[in-house]
């Protein structure tokens, strides 16, 4: 597993370090990367006239495959406190259109986009794996699993129980006073029984 530390950006937050320029994939709101015409074409795929939304989905724009997911809760910002495998810049996914996309650099370059701000999203050396609750069956409302997972790293505010390994909101994990493990409300470590 390769985890790359985020290098310096220039004083304005733009990606300037040569190491960062190795990115090949972007994860973020497609409205930041696609012009109006391409964004409109994407919306006709995502929101067809039959009214049925199609998420997640992938399709081609100008010969490049993009993947689009619905952002849980619509607009906002998904922050990541933990390192994400192969991510070389960015620590959050800002969302203004209610969508999160995985876009190849080749498409962005073809569109003439060459100066990116780290707050626009996450930048990767290899194609990332993006999951939102719309990808997982059984999700309804209360986020049993993290709202956004990128390369198996959960967005801030979600951690795995150290017993069952299921995700839970961080504030709902309890620390055992005996062994200091963090456990969800369905698990218990049994330390008290060992006395």
Image (cartoon, rainbow, N blue to C red):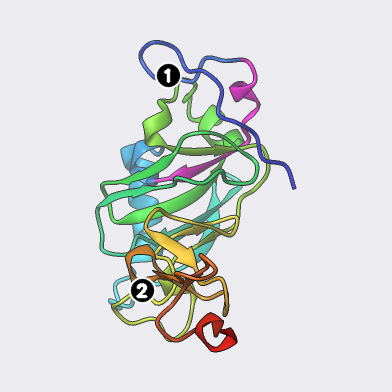
Q: Is residue 178 above or below residue 27?
A: below
For residue 193, which numbered disc appears in the image?
none
Q: Residue at x 34, y 57 (%)?
A: 43
Side of 106 where 33 appears, left or right: left
In this rendering, the answer to whether 117 lies above or below 32 is above
Would you identify the image quadrant in which residue 98 lies?
bottom left
Q: x, y percentage for residue 55?
A: 43, 69
Please name whichever residue, 60 or 172, is drawn nearer the observer in this view of the structure.
172
Seen from this angle, which residue lies furthest top?
11
Q: Residue furthest front?
A: 195
Of the residues under marks 1 and 2, which one precedes in the sequence?
1
Helix, strand or loop status at disc 2: loop
Magenta segment includes 193: no
**Residue toward you, 146 or 109:** 146
Q: Mark number for residue 143?
A: 2
Q: CA distance from mark 1 to mark 2?
A: 33 Å
Circles 1 and 2, Cβ within 8 Å, touching? The answer is: no
Which stretch did the figure color magenta? 18-28
């Amino acid at each position: 597993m390769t985890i790359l530390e985020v290098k310096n950006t220039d004083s304005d937050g733009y990606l300037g370090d040569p190491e960062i320029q190795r990115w090949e994939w972007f994860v973020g709101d497609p409205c930041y990367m696609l012009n109006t015409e391409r964004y409109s074409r994407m919306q006709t795929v995502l929101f067809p006239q039959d009214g049925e939304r199609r998420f997640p989905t992938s399709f081609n724009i100008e010969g490049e495959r993009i993947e689009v997911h619905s952002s849980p809760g619509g607009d906002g910002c998904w922050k990541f406190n933990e390192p994400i495998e192969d991510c070389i810049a960015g620590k959050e996914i800002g969302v203004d259109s209610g969508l999160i996309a995985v876009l190849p650099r080749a498409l962005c370059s073809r569109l003439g986009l060459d100066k990116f701000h780290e707050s626009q999203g996450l930048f990767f050396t290899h194609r990332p794996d993006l999951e939102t609750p719309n990808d997982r069956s059984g999700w309804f409302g209360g986020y049993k699993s993290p709202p956004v997972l990128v390369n198996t790293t959960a967005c801030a505010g979600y951690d795995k129980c150290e017993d069952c390994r299921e995700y839970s909101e961080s504030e709902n994990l309890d620390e055992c006073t005996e062994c200091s493990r963090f456990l969800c409300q369905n698990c218990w470590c049994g330390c008290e029984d060992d006395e």
